[in-house]
Amino acid sequence: MSRIKSFWQQRSLKFWLASGLVMTIAPVCLLAVLGYLRFHSEIVQPLVAVTEEQSQVLQPLNQIEINLWDVSRAVVDYAATGQRGYADSYVEHRDLIDQAFVRLEQAVARQPLLEQDVRQALADWRAVTEDAEQVLGLPPRMMDTSRRQPVLAFEDDIDRLGHDLGKLFEDVRLANEASHRRALAAITQFDQLALAALLLSVVFGVLGLWIINRSLIDSMNRLSDGAMKFADGDPDHRIEVRIPYELAGVADTFNTMRSKILLQQRELETAAITDSLTGLHNRRHFDRMLAQECLRAERFGQPLALVLCDIDHFKKFNDTYGHQNGDRVLKAVSEALHDAIRQVDVVCRYGGEEFVVILPNCDREQAGEAAERLRQTMAALSVQLADGQTVAISGSFGVAIQSDQDSDPETLIRRADDALYDSKRHGRDRVTLAAATEVT
C-alpha cells in the first residue's frame, strides 16, 4: 500500500495534467464519434429519406389529381354533348392516371398505412373507370335525361376517389411529422450525452473542463441548438462550428442536409401548385386562391371578378397538327395571358385548354375590359409550329362578378363557365359577361 501511495506522490504535474486531459478528453472523443454516427444515422439519413419518399409519393399523386379533373370533364361533357372527342380525351387521361397509380404503388411498397390508402384509392379508380366506360358506351342519341343514372354513379365514385386521395395526402403528412418527432427525440438524447460529457469533465479536472468548454461544449451547444431550432420550424438557421473537427463535420452535414431538405421542400411545394407544361399555377392552387379572394372581397366589400378562357377548336388543332404543337400553343397562350394581366391578378391553368384569371377589386365594367384585352392579346398571337409555319388562334371568354347572393367560389365558377359556353354557342372568339346580378 505504501509503495502505491509513494508512486502517485512522485508523479509530476505534467503527468497529472496529461492524465486529467486524457481522462477528460476520452469520454468527449467517444461522444463526438458516437454523436456523429447517431446524428447521421438517426437524423440526417431519415430526414433525407423521408423527403425522397414523399417526393416519390406526391408526384404521382399530383398527376392523378390533375388528370382526374380532365377525366371528369371528358365523361360529363360526353354525356352532355355526345361528341366522341371527349371519349378520346378520357382514354388519354385514364392511361396517365393508370401509369401514376403504378408508380404510386411502387413508392408505398414498404409503407403499410399508405399501401392500404393506395389500394382503396385504386379500387375507387377502377369503379370510376367502370362507370365512365358505361357512360361512354352509350350511343350519342341516348344521351337524355333518362340516362342520368350512370353519370350520377360516375360523379359519386369521383367524389369518393377524391376523398381517398385527400386521406392519402394527410397520411403522408402524418408520416412526415412522425419522422420529425423521431429526429427530435434523437436530438434530445444527443443533448443528454453532451451533458454527461460535461459532468465527466468536471469530475476529472477544472483544466479539462475549461478546455472542453472552449473547444467542445460551445460547439455542441451550437449544434444542438441549431438542430432544435430547425426541428422547431426555423429553417434559415445555420450552425457555425469550427472545432473540434468531428462536430464541425456534423455541423457541415447538418447544414448540407438542411439545404437539401429546404430545396426539396420548395420543389415539392412548387410542383404541387404548378402546371408542369405551362408553368402557371394549377387547379389546386386556383381553388385555394379563389376561396381566399372570395372571403377577402366579402369582408372588405370589394368587387371580385373571375374570367374563364377556352382556346377555340383546340381538339381539332391537336388532331390536325399533333399534341406536340398543341403543347406549343398552350405554352404561348400561358405566356401571353400572364404578361397581359395586372400584378395583383392570378392566372392559372384550369384544365386541358382552359385557363382562369382571378381579378381582385375589379367591377363588372373593368372585368369586361380586362377580358376583352385578354381576348385581343390571344387573337393577335402567332404561334410557330415545329415545322416552322405559324398559326393564329383565338379564345372564348366567360366573365362573372361575385355578388352578395352567390359569394361562394363554386357559384362564381359556375356562372363564369355558363358565360364561357354562351361565348362558344354564339360563334367563339368573344367575351360574354354573366347576368348582371353582381354588386358593382
Image: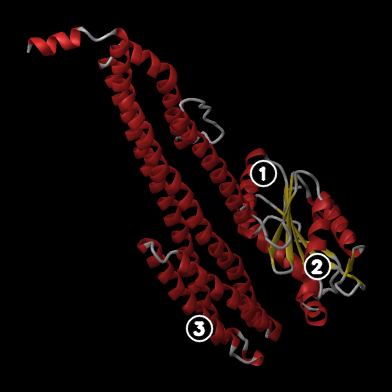
Does any portion of residue 406 appear in the rendered image? no
Give the residue pinned by disc 1.
297
User: Eyeballing the image, is 233 above or below 407?
Assistant: above
Does any portion of residue 247 appear in the rendered image? yes
**Residue flagged by tag 3: what amino acid is it?**
Glu
Q: Distance of mark 3 from mark 1, alpha carbons?
A: 42 Å
Find out whether the residues at labels 2 and 1 contact each other: C-beta distance under 8 Å. Answer: no
The mark closer to the camera, 3 or 1, is 3
Q: Residue at x 81, y 77 (%)?
A: 317
- Which sits in the foreground, 150 or 302? 150
Q: Residue at x 58, y 52 (%)?
A: 268
Q: Residue 199 in the image: x percent, y percent?
A: 28, 20
Give the residue pinned by disc 3.
130
**Residue flagged by tag 2: what amino acid is it?**
Arg
**Residue flagged by tag 1: what amino acid is it?**
Ala
Q: Residue 71 in the image: x percent, y percent?
A: 60, 74
Task: Tell me the quarter of the picture where residue 429 sits.
Answer: bottom right
Q: If you read the primary sequence from the N terminus, does the residue marked by circle 2 or circle 1 appear first?
A: 1
Q: If you read the primary sequence from the N terminus, does the residue marked by circle 3 or circle 1 appear first?
A: 3
Give the residue pinned by disc 2.
328
User: Eyeballing the image, is 203 above or below 284?
Assistant: above
Q: Considering the image in quadrants, where does the N terminus appear?
A: top left
For the residue labelled by badge 1, is the local secondary structure a helix, a strand or a loop? helix
